[in-house]
Image (cartoon, grey):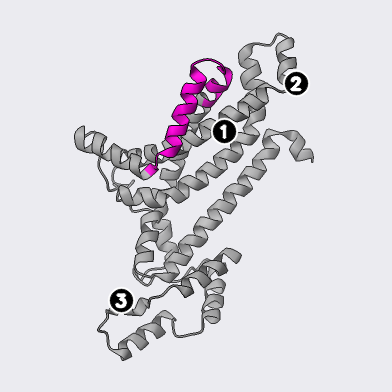
Amino acid sequence: MLASLLVFVALSSVPGDPAQLILGLNAAPDALAALRSQLGLDVPAPQRYLAWLAGALRGDLGESINYGRPVSALIIDRLAVSVPLTLGAGLIACLIALPLGVTAALRRGTWADPLVTVAAQVGAAVPSFWLGLLFILFFAVQLGWMPAGGFVPWERDFVGALRSLALPMLALGLGQAAVMTRMTRSAMIDALGQDYVRTARAKGLEPGTVVFGHALRNALVTLVTILGLSLSNVFIGSIVIEQVFALPGLGRLALTAIGTRDFPLIQGEIVLYASVIILLGFLVDVSYGLLDPRIRID
């Protein structure tokens, strides 16, 4: 609720008249007044917010000024692109970061540790949109293996939809993998130095059991937190990457709404982003009790 209020106040302070943008600069005053009344822009801001809030509590986020459709319907349509993109990028980040981070922690003092650390530092410094442009030039333009942009609907061609999302997933996932690799390395180094790991080694347990059954299992509490933050970053970062690859997702919809001063759509999307971040934080908190019974008891 607080997030929606802050968004409403910020949008109300933005200069520009949506009715003027729709009808043009030469529109007649009577036509502008009629459109403002139709859009509900002729009532005081507090009344508009309370009306929007009452509708949002019923699941009605209002109607888009630019598209003339319910905001909730527009958002649901775009979830078919943004949700698989976010989950796929998060999966790629995990598949890269966990093995590299664990390897760097186990091989401290050897060539593998600085190599992984430097690669992670470089990867974290490279913007995902720049990676996306490089992937387009190499995989789409030079080699012709992947599409340069656009999206094929899932119901039309499932494989084509996956191909459309492959390069954006990779561009987003590599950036988060770099951050997760460094955090995984730090968490594993800390876990490997604990007394229970030394005790497990002293008992003669297999190295794999010590690493994966004891150290990694306890480091997962930290890693789950990092994963939750990474998924939030990927979800928000998709705003730019969807524009680079011309994907019809939530990010591109948000940029279009900002450009056309579509206040109901902007507010609905920002509230959605805030809700997703809060939900991810809640799921991370719940997972703590599943991974570490001591937290559940506390």
Q: Amino acid at mark 3?
A: Ile
Mark 3 Cα-neighbour bin, 10 Å: few <14, some 14–19, many ≥20: some
In the rendered image, the vertical position of residue 140 relative to residue 262, given as above or below: above
The reply to whether callout 3 and callout 2 are in contact (CB within 8 Å) is: no
Mark 2 Cα-neighbour bin, 10 Å: few <14, some 14–19, many ≥20: few
Q: Amino acid at mark 2?
A: Asp
The reply to whether callout 2 and callout 1 are in contact (CB within 8 Å) is: no
Using the numbered discs, state the Cα–Cα distance from disc 3 to disc 1 in whole angstroms.
48 Å
In the rendered image, the vertical position of residue 202 relative to residue 95, given as above or below: above
Instruction: Kindly state the secondary structure of the residue where label 3 is placed.
Output: helix
Using the numbered discs, state the Cα–Cα distance from disc 3 to disc 2 in whole angstroms.
67 Å
Q: Position of residue 63 (x, y in %)?
A: 42, 71
Magenta extent: 101-128
Q: Which numbered disc covers residue 61?
A: none
Nearer-the-camera pick, 58 or 205:
205
Q: Amino acid at mark 1?
A: Met
Determine the residue located farthest toward the top in the rendered image.
Answer: 204
Q: Which numbered disc covers residue 183?
A: 1
Decide whether residue 117 is among the magenta residues: yes
Q: Which numbered disc covers residue 22?
A: 3
Write down the quadrant of residue 69 in the picture. Answer: bottom left
Write down the quadrant of residue 64 in the picture. Answer: bottom left
Q: Position of residue 138 (x, y in %)?
A: 25, 34
Decide whether residue 245 is among the magenta residues: no
The kind of secondary structure the magenta stretch mainly shows is helix
Q: Which numbered disc covers residue 195?
A: 2
The label nearer to you, 3 versus 1, is 1
The label nearer to you, 3 versus 2, is 2
Using the numbered discs, state the Cα–Cα distance from disc 2 to disc 1 in whole angstroms.
21 Å
